[in-house]
Image (cartoon, helix red, strand yellow):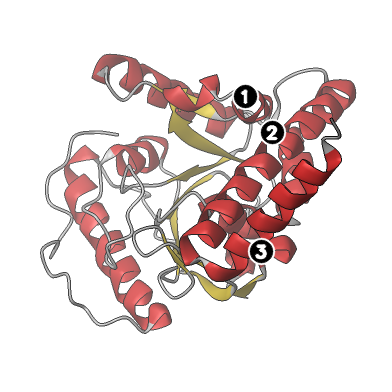
Amino acid sequence: MELWPWLTAALLLLLLLVQLSRSARFCAKITLYCALCLSASTVAAVICLLRHHGPTVENMRIIKWFVSKFKYIFGLRFETKGLQKLEVDHPCVIISNHQSILDMMGLMEALPERCVQIAKRELIFLGPVGLIMYLGGIFFINRQHSRTAMTVMADVGERMVKENLKVWIYPEGTRNDNGDLLPFKKGAFYLAIQTQVPVIPVIYSSFSSFYNPKTKLFSSGTIKVEVLDAIPTSGLTVADVPKLMDTCYQAMRTTFFRISKTPQENRAAAGPGCQPAQ
């Protein structure tokens, strides 16, 4: 029995569902996004291994090239302001808000030279995606074991100064799509003060106008990205961590509402509060 008629009919039915159902369109786009991540990671990993033979921050250029093409497939535009503030020739801690799985595209849009990220340890087990993150020099921390996490952060501090690295951290600690910023965790600010390097905040506007898993919305849209002035930490001590964290939080939250044109409906997080070290 010929399979082609059945396969053709199934494909046509799928296309019809995608056209008629918002949920089907959402699922199809998420599936495509995951497939792109897997395939791009596989190809990029091969190139990274052939070119640099192992993990190095230099591989981030290759990863950035691949991921920066995703926006054309999903109809996303980025309006950036102040990216030159990230192109400094010294170590720094870069912090940004964290909204969804699409953040990777925004990250690569703004990623400066010699910049690596800190990510949760579980991500290293995501097959090709975990491999390419490892090859890109990303630091993995086990957030369930604070002593291990502190050891990794201490190693990060030594390496960022020794190797002239910029470190990108999401101080909220997890993805958040509630239309506001979550309270910050302290890890990024301890790292900046212990190494006496500046903190540079980066803010992405809300994705809610084009991406919302709760309502199955995934359409084209524009993301505004704004880089704020660097906040120096020279002369600060561990006792200054709460003040530094609050300064960054308030500046980023104000900018987030401004570039998102979102009403400040969620007032629960009036300040960063006291959170465990990241």
First of labels 3, 1 by sequence position: 3
Q: What element does badge 3 sit on? A: helix
166 left or right of 73?
left
Q: Pick whichever, 267 or 22, lies toward us.
A: 22
Image position of 212 with respect to 93: above or below: below
First of labels 3, 2 by sequence position: 2
Screen quadrant of the N terminus: top right
Say if mark 2 contacts mark 1, CB within 8 Å.
no
CA–CA distance between discs 3 and 2?
A: 27 Å
Screen quadrant of the C terminus: top left
* Spot occupied by residue 207 in the image (x, y as percentages of width and height): 45, 68
Image position of 54 with respect to 278: above or below: above
Q: Residues within 10 Å of mark 1 (few under 14, many from 20)?
A: many
CA–CA distance between discs 3 and 1?
A: 26 Å
What residue is pinned by disc 3? 74
165 left or right of 274?
right
